Image (spheres, rainbow, N blue to C red):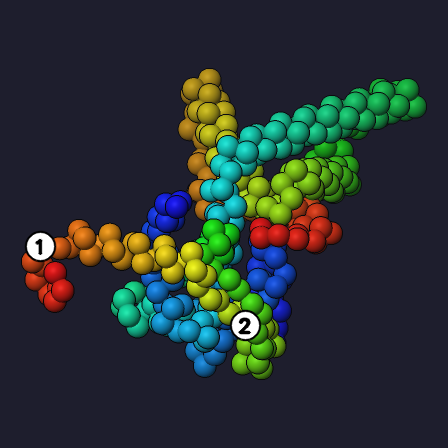
Amino acid sequence: MPDPTILGEFEQFVLLAILRLGDKAYGVTILAEITECTGREPSPGALYTTLDRLEDKGLLTARMGESTALRGGRAKRYFRVSGSGVKAVAYAQNCYQSLMKGLELPGVADA
Amino acid sequence: MHKARIAEWMLSLFTTGDRAASMAGDLVESAAGRRGLRFWWRLAQTAASLAWKSIAAEPLFMMGLAFRGLLLNLSLWFLVSLAMVAVALVGIFVAAAGGGTAALAAIPKLSGHKSLFSFVFFVLATVTGFAIQFQTGRWIARRARGREIAACSVFLAIGTILWMAARDVTLYAIERASRTHLPSESVVVTLLGNLIVWLPLLAGAVRVRRRSTPKGPA
């Protein structure tokens, strides 16, 4: 079995945000979800280059959606995490859990 | 909605058409109901990130292409300078042959700032300069399909740094030789001046980009 893809921190944020959003994951909602959950507002440029990279790695799939007047008539691009994307993010989270095991950090409930 | 059209046009210089359209739509949707420069700032951020992604993917190729472009650019400028000197010499020769010493004596007067001669020379030099920059932009863009603007940005960055370094070294040498202090030009003025000179180069790259239709991720 090949090793799962190693993900960077922001790549994990993006994948987790898309998983949380389900069928409603496109640029605007992904940015809003990351901002709400992390308290950090990423730049759209960082998000789009990360989405492109994850798509190139086969961890995401994209499909074009509907366009609205609010968007100047431009179509939305919806994202979905692929099977290997789920495996990669699960692997990364397991690594974190293993490293956290036995540690007592102030403010972290599951340590 | 002109904002969306401008954003889509700008982003399509860096990525595929469908991606550019959806990114432009996202930016417009995010900026809805907000005033100020937020939309334009985020558009600039997005374009810069996409350009940087292309450069970071193959930095050595981009650097090599930029240096080859500089070599071509300098060669073209050298050839044009030679041609201009040759034309000037022919002009002097013709004037001397036609009007004798009286015509030759009139040449210093013609070289004054307000003379027709200097105006024509300025126009010709400007048009030729723009043509050289435009062709250099096209040359670079043709060798970096899908990453045309990013490749030209590397050229501009390296070209500007080298130009400023060469200018400072030359000024230093003149100051040492003449034992005088020359007034220094601010960096902002130099960068703005360079921007005007480099605009035709970007126009050349945009023309190549517009004529090619990227099929994969850029």
Pointer 1 and pointer 2 on the same chain: yes
Callout 2 secondary element: strand
Q: Is residue B162 above or below residue A17?
A: above
Local crowd at mark 1 within 10 Å, few (<14), some, or many (≥20)? few
Which image quadrant for residue A93?
bottom left
Q: Nearer the viewer, residue B81 or A22?
A: A22
What amino acid is at disc 2?
Lys
Residue tagged 1: A102
Which image quadrant for residue B153?
top right
Q: Is residue B121 something one can see in this rendering?
A: yes
- Give the image location of residue A19, x and y in percent: 38, 68
Q: Which comes sooner in the sequence, label 1 or label 2?
A: 2
- Give the image location of residue A91, x and y in percent: 31, 54
Q: Is residue B207 above or below residue B92?
A: below
- Give the image location of residue B33, x and y in percent: 45, 81
Residue tagged 2: A76
Marks 1,2: beta carbons within 8 A: no
Q: Is residue B108 something one can see in this rendering?
A: no
Tag 2, which chain? A
